[in-house]
Every structure is written in C-alpha cells, then in structure tokens.
Image: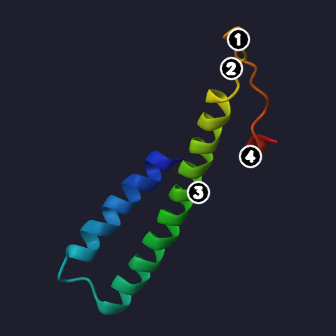
Amino acid sequence: MNWEKQLEELREITEELKDEQTSLEDSIALFEKGVKITKEIEKRLQQAEQKISVILNSVDDEGELSVEPFEGER
C-alpha cells in the first residue's frame, strides 16, 4: 500500500474513532491499526530523508551528481 493510501486510511480511522457509536472493542482495534500504519509511514519518511541526504551529499567538486543505489533499494 502506498503512503497516500495509508494517509487516507488514517483519516478514515480518525473519523471512525470520533464517532460516538463506535464500540470500545472496535475503537481499540482501530487505534491498533492506526498505530501500525503510522509506524509504516514513519519508516518510509525516514528512508526518504536518508535518500535525500545521500543525494545532497553526492555532488562532487565540479557540481556533478554521482548517485549510487540507496541502501533501501537493493
């Protein structure tokens, strides 16, 4: 699942948790699912930040970009 779909799912979970008709058991299950999705999104964002850092640090003295495959892509 891509991160856009994960964000949308988090929005839906949030709306369901706001609904006073949602049972306690369902709320706990939704919360658990939301935490799992949040951790997956955070991992993806950290990987993206690392990749950007590698790219920014890959410019040589002549201004040429020498990008090597990112660790997470191997």
Residue tagged by mark 1? 64
Residue flagged by tag 4: what amino acid is it? Gly
Mark 2 or mark 4: whose residue is earlier in sequence: 2
Crowd around label 3: few <14 · some 14–19 · many ≥20 (10 Å):
few
Q: In the structure shown, which secondary structural element does the residue marked by tag 2 occupy?
A: loop
Cα distance in 3D space between marks 2 and 4: 20 Å
User: Which mark, by number, is residue 72?
Assistant: 4
Cα distance in 3D space between marks 1 and 3: 29 Å
Residue at (58, 57) in percent of width and height: 43
Q: In the structure shown, which secondary structural element does the residue marked by tag 4 occupy?
A: helix
User: Which mark, by number, is residue 43?
Assistant: 3
Cα distance in 3D space between marks 2 and 3: 26 Å
Image coordinates for residue 63, horizontal then vertical, percent: 66, 11
Residue flagged by tag 1: what amino acid is it? Glu
Q: Quadrant of residue 24?
A: bottom left
Q: In the structure shown, which secondary structural element does the residue marked by tag 1 occupy?
A: loop
Mark 3 or mark 4: whose residue is earlier in sequence: 3
Crowd around label 1: few <14 · some 14–19 · many ≥20 (10 Å):
few
Image coordinates for residue 60, horizontal then vertical, percent: 73, 17
Cα distance in 3D space between marks 3 and 4: 11 Å
Q: Quadrant of residue 14?
A: bottom left
Residue at (34, 83) in percent of width and height: 27
Mark 2 or mark 3: whose residue is earlier in sequence: 3
